Amino acid sequence: MLHDIWRAETRKSAEQAFDLFVKTFEDKYPKATASLQKDRTELLAFYDFPAMHWQSIRTTNPIESAFATIRHRTKRSKGCLARDGMLHMIFKLGQCAEQNWRKLRGFNHLADVIQGVNFKDGIKQTQTETAAA
């Protein structure tokens, strides 16, 4: 049922799936459902971004992948370097890893997001649609 929430095509269907999940599991898991309800706005915030960005917003994999190399090297050299040397090594490893990063899907929409353009269910809203809403 959780997958139905974050894989929904629109915010409205996600809200319906969210309500169904809470109604179904509220008696059995009251603390978990209360926590989800408290953070409902933040959990569904990705519907206000371009649909091409949703996959990147929903996952922590880019963060985990970026630091996998750094984590691997720092565990092996633990205690071998002073603090400043370790920070320098981590910085250089990050720079090397940066060369293999892929562009964000829908990177051409980043300027719209930064400028505050409104998106509804992943679709860019025009001025007339925004005014009507």
Image (spheres, rainbow, N blue to C red):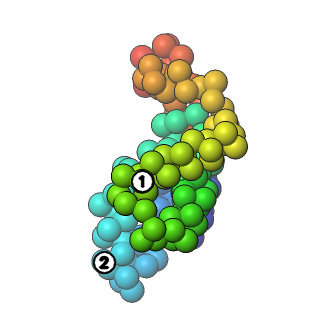
Name the amino acid type tagged 1: Gly
User: Residue at the spot x=52%, y=36% of the render?
Assistant: 49
Q: Is residue 43 visible?
A: no
Name the amino acid type tagged 2: Lys
42 and 1: which is toward the camera: 42
The number of discs equals 2
User: Residue 45 appears at what percent x and percent y?
Assistant: 44, 45
- Residue 81 appears in which quarter of the rendering? bottom left
Left or right of residue 87: residue 11? right
Circles 1, 2 touching at the beta carbon (< 8 Å)? no
Asked if residue 130 is positioned above or below residue 58 in the image, the reply reads: above
Asked if residue 72 is positioned above or below residue 44 in the image, the reply reads: below
Which residue is under mark 1? 85
User: Residue 84 appears at what percent x and percent y?
Assistant: 36, 52
Left or right of residue 114: residue 92? right
> How far is the residue under mark 1 from the one under mark 2?
45 Å
User: Residue at the spot x=46%, y=77% of the render?
Assistant: 24
- Which of discs 1 and 2 lies nearer the camera? The answer is 1
